[in-house]
Amino acid sequence: MRKKLMLLMTGLMAILILAACGSKSQEDVVKELEGKDLTSYKVDAKMTLKMGEDSQVYNVEIWHKDPSFYRVNLKNAEKDQSQMILRNNQGVFVLTPALNKSFKFQSDWPQNSSQAYLYESLIKDIVADKEAKFSETKDHYVFETKTRYQNNSMLPFQEIKLKKKDLAPVSVKVMDPDRNALVTVEFEKVKFKASFDKDDFEMKKNMTRAQLDLPAMSGGGDEAFTIKYPALELKGTKLVDEKEIALENGKRVVLTYDGKKSYTLVQEKVKAKEASTTYVEGNLVDLGFTIGAVSSHSITWSHDGVDYIIASKNLTKGEMIEVAKSVQAEAVK
């Protein structure tokens, strides 16, 4: 009996030792992430944005090829909208296929801030945060880290879940200060060591391909569009003027907000024109629902066939970004 008990205890100890050997520490996982081969990959993901009481869902297709080629295609299936971020040897472009328009940035994107849908950005966030929280489940490693957004006071934290098997991304939750998830990315398909054609990151080819995916190219210039008002109310600032201006091929609305934090919001809907590329001074900024350009005194973006610009000498870049995000909440005047 005693011999059997000794054998049983020996067996249990062996199991515990093997289990301990198979468990990785936070430092082990971080080191493995730092050595991850990211020469090329293709990813399909779903991104959900919580905007007030509503949520918007985007399908996101991400391609990456060393050294610095990127193609991020964002599609809102419900509204037949798409927008693409493209980085190649010529620079960083944001394509809006429905308007046949592209913006070119002199930017170090995606290195300058967190990007919830880019795997190497998540790794960078994990490595950079020496105070990151670490936990694990049966199949996953989970990190909670600080973010590196330009205005990270609104979205300071993120939860990153990785597969234990190969450290592939599973999900990301970007959270507000109360740890409510406002942006959620669910990775549905991840393929490392992906192959690409020579011109897969070329701007004209991607514009043409994206336009072919649209259900119909709508001019839209003569159609009425819904005027949108920022849901974010800045203390001491109120709407003092609203003007509508008829254009040859569309309409422009100018909203003037006056007070301690004064600014002007311009909305303009025009017909799709011949292909054009606009050179933008400013930094590419991810507004969640679309990509914009922010400079010291203005922020511009396009959404649902409408061009927007906020101009102000009183708002900080962070404040302009937050006002811009709130415009899509469709506040009532």
Image (tube, grey):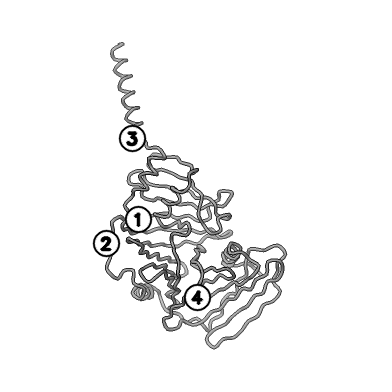
Q: Are marks 2 and 3 in contact (CB under 8 Å)?
A: no
- Residue kind at label 4, given as amino acid type: Gly
Question: Looking at the image, is mark 4 or mark 2 nearer the viewer?
Answer: 2
- Marked residue nearer the N-terminal end (4 or 1): 1
Report, in whole angstroms, how far the alpha carbon at label 3 lies from the one at label 4.
53 Å
- Residue kind at label 3, given as amino acid type: Gly
Q: Residues within 10 Å of mark 3 (few under 14, many from 20)?
A: few
In the image, 311 versus 211, the foreground residue is 311
Q: Residue at x 53, y 52 (%)?
A: 175
Q: Secondary structure at mark 1?
A: strand
Report, in whole angstroms, how far the alpha carbon at label 4 lies from the one at label 2.
34 Å
Q: Which residue is mark 3?
A: 22
Question: Looking at the image, is mark 3 or mark 4 nearer the viewer?
Answer: 3
Q: Which residue is mark 1?
A: 189
Q: Which residue is mark 4?
A: 305
- Marked residue nearer the N-terminal end (3 or 4): 3
In the image, 8 versus 23, the foreground residue is 23
Q: Which residue is mark 2?
A: 195
Give the position of the C terminus as an image quadrant. Answer: bottom right
Q: Residue at x 37, y 55 (%)?
A: 188
Q: Secondary structure at mark 4?
A: loop
- Marked residue nearer the N-terminal end (4 or 2): 2
Counting from the top left corner in percent of width and height, residue 88 is at 36, 68
